[in-house]
Amino acid sequence: MSNQRSYIKSVICICILLMANCTVHAKEYNILNFGAKKDTAFTSTEAFNSAIAECTKSGGGRVVVPAGNYKSGTIILKDNVELYLEPGATIFASYKHKD
C-alpha cells in the first residue's frame, strides 16, 4: 500500500511539472507586431484580432498588450489564448459601431 501511494504521488508530481513546463513555454504574440499603436486616436482592433488569430493557428499562447493606451472595437478571444495586459496597459473601447 505504501509503494502504491508513493507511486501515485510521483505520477501527480510529474503531471504538475509537465503542465507547468507547457505554460512557461507558451508562445507570445505582441500586438505591436501586428500593427497596434499606442495611440487612442488609432483603432487597433485589427491588430488585436490578427494576433489572436495567429496565436490560435499556432495552437495557443499569450497575446501581449504592452504598456500604453490602445483603442479597440470588439476583440474576439478564442480557445487557448490568454490576453495579457502588461502593467500600464489600458484598452479603451471605441464608440464607433464599425470598429
Image (cartoon, rainbow, N blue to C red):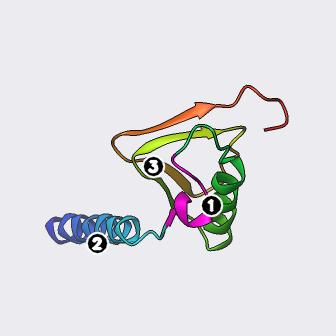
Which residue has dot 1 on it?
35
Q: Residues within 10 Å of mark 3 (few under 14, many from 20)?
A: some
Going from the N terminus, do you reach mark 1 or mark 3 first? 1
Say what secondary structure mark 3 lies in.
Answer: strand
Q: Which residues are magenta?
A: 29-38
Say what secondary structure mark 2 lies in.
Answer: helix
| Alpha carbon separation for disc pair 2 and 3 | 27 Å
The quadrant of the picture occupied by the C terminus is top right
Q: Say which amino acid is labelled 2.
A: Ile
Going from the N terminus, do you reach mark 2 or mark 3 first? 2
Going from the N terminus, do you reach mark 2 or mark 1 first? 2
Residue 52: horizontal and vertical position, in percent? 64, 58
Is residue 90 placed above or below 35 in the rendered structure? above
Q: Say which amino acid is labelled 3.
A: Tyr
The quadrant of the picture occupied by the N terminus is bottom left
Residue 68: horizontal and vertical position, in percent? 43, 43
Residue lying farthest right? 98
Residue 90: horizontal and vertical position, in percent? 47, 36
- Whether residue 1 sits left or right of residue 45 in the image: it is left
37 falls in the magenta region: yes
Q: Residues within 10 Å of mark 2 (few under 14, many from 20)?
A: few
Nearer to us: label 2 or label 1: 1
Nearer to us: label 2 or label 3: 3
Which residue has dot 3 on it?
84
The front one of 64 and 67 is: 67
Residue drawn at x 22%, y 64% as measured from the top left: 9
The front one of 82 and 39 is: 39
The front one of 29 and 14 is: 29
Residue 14, numbered label: 2
Say what secondary structure mark 1 lies in.
Answer: loop
